[in-house]
Image (tube, rainbow, N blue to C red):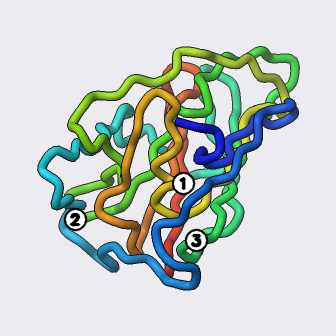
């Protein structure tokens, strides 16, 4: 993965690397090309494609603005719950407690999922069917510190969110209910926020 292709992922309050998503999958002005509305499940025409597994228990993906993990409060804020295809999804995770040193996982411990009749499914996967690993690096945060993600809602930018694997989005993004989940809080707790791609 090259930095010129990676979605912008930077840390709050630190001089993180800023990179901008590069090529676009569809011509400017076109909307989402994937399935829209209520769907049974995400399916990919490529038989080699392996969808990313959910790495956290379903009931631990909270939708509240604040969540407590190992007695430390965190907030996951989402800027705008309705998004158009190609717009930027901005998410901020921050620690709310003072005088604490909370250790959290890297900013790549995320899931971008679509709600289906079969449950939540990650829109990303490996085109060759390989398994993925996640960075083992951690970060110690105090009050007001955490991560900021700015993710362009296009296939290449959403796929380019993991430095340890080459991912793809399959099928293409479609209008419907999605959620962003960070699963690196203390105690392996996950926190998520729901958003709609509306066209």
Residue at position x 37%, y 60% from top? Answer: 114
Do we see residue 141 in this rendering?
yes
For label 2, the SS is loop
Q: Specify the quadrant of the image occupied by residue 58.
A: top left
Q: Is label 2 or label 1 in front?
A: 1
Residue at position x 86%, y 31% from top? Answer: 15
Q: Which residue is mark 1?
A: 157
Measured as percent of width and height from the top left, residue 148 is found at 73, 43
Measured as percent of width and height from the top left, residue 159 is found at 45, 49
For label 1, the SS is helix
Q: Which residue is mark 2?
A: 117
Measured as percent of width and height from the top left, residue 180 is found at 52, 51
Q: Is label 2 or label 3 in front?
A: 3
Which callout, 2 or 3, points at the residue further toward the start of the chain? 3
Residue at position x 57%, y 84% from top? Answer: 29
Numbered circle sitting on residue 180 = none
Q: 20 and 82: which one is in front?
A: 20
Q: Which residue is mark 3?
A: 86
Which callout, 3 or 1, points at the residue further toward the start of the chain? 3
For label 3, the SS is loop
Is the residue 162 above or below the residue 116 in the image?
above
Q: 100 and 162: which one is in front?
A: 162
């Amino acid at each position: 993965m090259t930095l010129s292709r990676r979605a912008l992922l930077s840390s709050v309050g630190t001089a993180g690397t800023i990179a901008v998503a590069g090529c676009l999958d569809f011509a400017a002005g076109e909307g989402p090309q994937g399935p829209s509305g209520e769907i049974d499940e995400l399916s990919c025409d490529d038989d080699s494609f392996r969808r990313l597994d959910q790495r956290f228990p379903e009931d631990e993906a909270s939708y509240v603005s604040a969540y407590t993990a190992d007695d430390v409060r965190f907030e996951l804020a989402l800027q705008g719950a309705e998004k158009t295809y190609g717009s930027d999804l901005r998410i901020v995770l921050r620690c709310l407690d003072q005088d604490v040193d909370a250790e959290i996982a890297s900013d790549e411990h995320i899931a971008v999922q679509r709600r289906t009749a079969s449950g939540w499914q990650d829109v990303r996967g490996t085109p060759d069917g390989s398994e993925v690993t996640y960075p083992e690096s951690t970060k110690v945060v105090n009050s007001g510190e955490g991560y900021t993600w700015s993710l362009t809602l296009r296939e290449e930018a959403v796929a380019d969110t993991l430095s340890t694997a080459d991912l793809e989005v399959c099928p293409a993004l479609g209008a419907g209910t999605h959620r962003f989940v960070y699963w690196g809080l203390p105690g392996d707790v996950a926190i998520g926020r729901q958003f709609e791609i509306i066209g």
